[in-house]
Amino acid sequence: MLAWIYQNLSTIIISLIIVAVVAAIIISTVRNRKKGKSACGCGCSNCPMSGSCHLKK
């Protein structure tokens, strides 16, 4: 088992880095959505989809 880990250590490390980056992106997106920030980065005043993007509850 230890030999397999040593043989695949670079793949394991790269996979963990990719998983960490994807998790950070998802967490950032969720936090921004909770704050009400837009995903596109521009204002909603000129957006043709502004009525569909932020539904009022």
Image (tube, grey):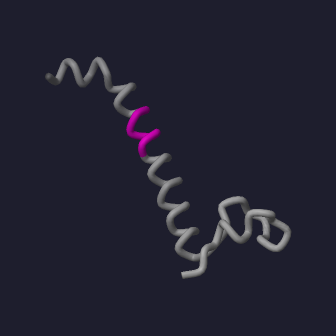
Q: Residue 37 occupies which quadrant of the picture?
A: bottom right
Eyeballing the image, is 2 above or below 35?
Answer: above
Q: Is residue 14 left or right of residue 2?
A: right
Q: Which secondary structure type mostly characterizes the magenta part of the structure?
A: helix
Q: Residue 47 occupies which quadrant of the picture?
A: bottom right
Q: Position of residue 30 (x, y in %)?
A: 50, 64
Q: Is residue 42 left or right of residue 20?
A: right
Q: Can you name the residue that lies furthest to the right here? A: 46
For the residue pair 10 and 15, the one nearer the viewer reads as 15
Q: Quadrant of the C terminus?
A: bottom right
Q: Report the residue at 85% width, 68% height from top.
A: 46
Q: Report the residue at 67% width, 67% height from top.
A: 52
Residue 18 magenta-highlighted: yes
Residue 30 magenta-highlighted: no
For the residue pair 57 and 3, the one nearer the viewer reads as 57
Q: Report the residue at 38% width, 25% height from top.
A: 11
Q: Position of residue 32 (x, y in %)?
A: 58, 68
Q: Position of residue 29 (x, y in %)?
A: 55, 61
Which range of residues does the magenta coloring cover?
14-19
Eyeballing the image, is 36 above or below 26?
Answer: below
Q: Is residue 26 left or right of residue 44?
A: left
Q: Report the residue at 14% width, 22% height from top.
A: 1
Q: Residue 40 occupies which quadrant of the picture?
A: bottom right
Q: Position of residue 13 (x, y in %)?
A: 38, 33
Eyeballing the image, is 46 above or below 23?
Answer: below
Eyeballing the image, is 54 above or below 25?
Answer: below
